[in-house]
C-alpha cells in the first residue's frame, strides 16, 4: 500500500491510498474519511486502477483531478469519493492500470521515455499543464509536458520541455497573488542526488525565472536500508495563513516540514 494524499471538503478529511500486489498488479485506489482525524471510516473503493502521485487537486470549475503516473482520473463529485473517470495521453488499449511498474510498457510502445509522477497547474485560459518526470534510462534532465483543453478529459501527446529536473518528484501550484510556482529539484549535474530543494516562480506559467533555494543541508542516514537515497524527495506543498509549507522526505528515512512566509517571495 502507498499513501496517496488527502482531500478536504467541509469538515471532512479524505485519505487516499493505492494498493497493488508485490508484483505491481491488481491495482486499486481506496479512501477513508474522518471528521476528527482520529476515527476513520471503513475503506471506500474509488473504482479506478491507479496509484496516485498526489491527492486530488481542483481545477477552476471545481473538478478534481488526481495526478497519477500517466493517468489522471477526474470527478465532479466535490467530495472526491465517487464518479472517478480515467483519462490519459495514452490510448486505452495500451494500459489496464497505473502503478509504479506499469508506465514503462506504454511508453516504449509510444516511442516515449518512461514518464511518471505528474503535477499540474491551470492557466487563466483554462488549459491544464501537466508536467511529468522522466526516470530510468530515459532520463535526460528535462521534464515533459502534456496539456488538456477540456478540463482533464483529453490530453495532448507529451513533449519535452526546457524545464530541468533531477529525476525526482515535483509539485506545482499557484500563489495567492496568482503567480505560479514549482517546488522540486532542477539540478542536473548530480543525477538523483535530489538537492538543493528549489522554489521557482512564474508570472505566466511559461517562464519560471525567479528561483530560490529552500534548503540544501545534507542529511546523514541513521540506518542504511533498501532504496534509501536522495537528500530531498517527494516534495508537496500547502499554503495556509500566509505561509507556504513544504513537506519532504529526507533520504526516505525521515520527514521534514519547512515553512516560510509567502510575502518573502518577491
Image (cartoon, helix red, strand yellow):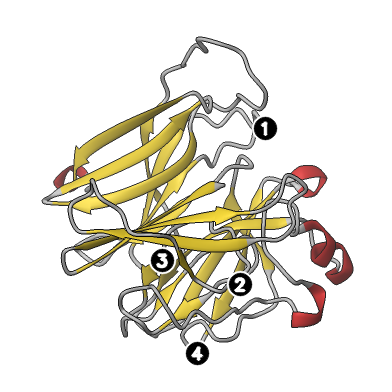
Q: Secondary structure at mark 3?
A: loop
Neighbor class of circle 2 (other Cα within 10 Å; few <14, some 14-19, many 20+) is many
**Would you identify the image quadrant in which residue 8 lies?**
bottom left
Q: Which mark is residue 150?
A: 4
Residue 48 on image: x %, y %: 58, 72
Q: Secondary structure at mark 1?
A: loop
Report how far apart the C-alphas of labels 1 and 2 lie in the structure. Answer: 24 Å
Report how far apart the C-alphas of labels 1 and 3 lie in the structure. Answer: 29 Å
**Would you identify the image quadrant in which residue 204 lies?**
bottom left
Numbered disc in front, either 2 or 3: 3
Q: Which mark is residue 110?
A: none
Question: Left of 188 or right of it: where is 172?
Answer: left
Residue 169 on image: x %, y %: 54, 46
Report how far apart the C-alphas of labels 4 and 2 lie in the structure. Answer: 13 Å
Residue 36 on image: x %, y %: 18, 52
Q: Which mark is residue 191?
A: 1
Q: Residue at x 60, y 79 (%)?
A: 87
Q: Between residue 23 and residue 99, name the one nearer to us.
A: 23
Report how far apart the C-alphas of labels 4 and 1 lie in the structure. Answer: 35 Å
Q: Secondary structure at mark 2?
A: strand
Report how far apart the C-alphas of labels 2 and 3 lie in the structure. Answer: 18 Å
Of the two numbered discs 4 and 1 on the same chain, state the one appearing first in sequence. 4
Q: Residue at x 52, y 13 (%)?
A: 221
Residue under label 2, please give it. Answer: 146
Amino acid at each position: 500500500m502507498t499513501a496517496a494524499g488527502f482531500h478536504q471538503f467541509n469538515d471532512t478529511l479524505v485519505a487516499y491510498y493505492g494498493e497493488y500486489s508485490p508484483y505491481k498488479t491488481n491495482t486499486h485506489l481506496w479512501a477513508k474519511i474522518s471528521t476528527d482525524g482520529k476515527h476513520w471510516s471503513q475503506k471506500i473503493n474509488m473504482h479506478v486502477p491507479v496509484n496516485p502521485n498526489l491527492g486530488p487537486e481542483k481545477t477552476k470549475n471545481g473538478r478534481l483531478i488526481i495526478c497519477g503516473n500517466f493517468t489522471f482520473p477526474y470527478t465532479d463529485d466535490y467530495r472526491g469519493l465517487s464518479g472517478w473517470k480515467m483519462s490519459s495521453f495514452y490510448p486505452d488499449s495500451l494500459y489496464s492500470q497505473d502503478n509504479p511498474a506499469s508506465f514503462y510498457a506504454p511508453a516504449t510502445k509510444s516511442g516515449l521515455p518512461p514518464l511518471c509522477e505528474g503535477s499540474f497547474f491551470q492557466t487563466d485560459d483554462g488549459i491544464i499543464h501537466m508536467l511529468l518526470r522522466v526516470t530510468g534510462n530515459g532520463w535526460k534532465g528535462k521534464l515533459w509536458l502534456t496539456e488538456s483543453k477540456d478540463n482533464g478529459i483529453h490530453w495532448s501527446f507529451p513533449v519535452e520541455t526546457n524545464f530541468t529536473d533531477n529525476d525526482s518528484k515535483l509539485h506545482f501550484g499557484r500563489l495567492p497573488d496568482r503567480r505560479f510556482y514549482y517546488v522540486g529539484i532542477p539540478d542536473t549535474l548530480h543525477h538523483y542526488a535530489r538537492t538543493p530543494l528549489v522554489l521557482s516562480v512564474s508570472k505566466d506559467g511559461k517562464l519560471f525565472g525567479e528561483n530560490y533555494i529552500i534548503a540544501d543541508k545534507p542529511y546523514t542516514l541513521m540506518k542504511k536500508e533498501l532504496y534509501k537515497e536522495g537528500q530531498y524527495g517527494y516534495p508537496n506543498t500547502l499554503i495556509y495563513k500566509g505561509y507556504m509549507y513544504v513537506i519532504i522526505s529526507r533520504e526516505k528515512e525521515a520527514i521534514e516540514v519547512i515553512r516560510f512566509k509567502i510575502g518573502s517571495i518577491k
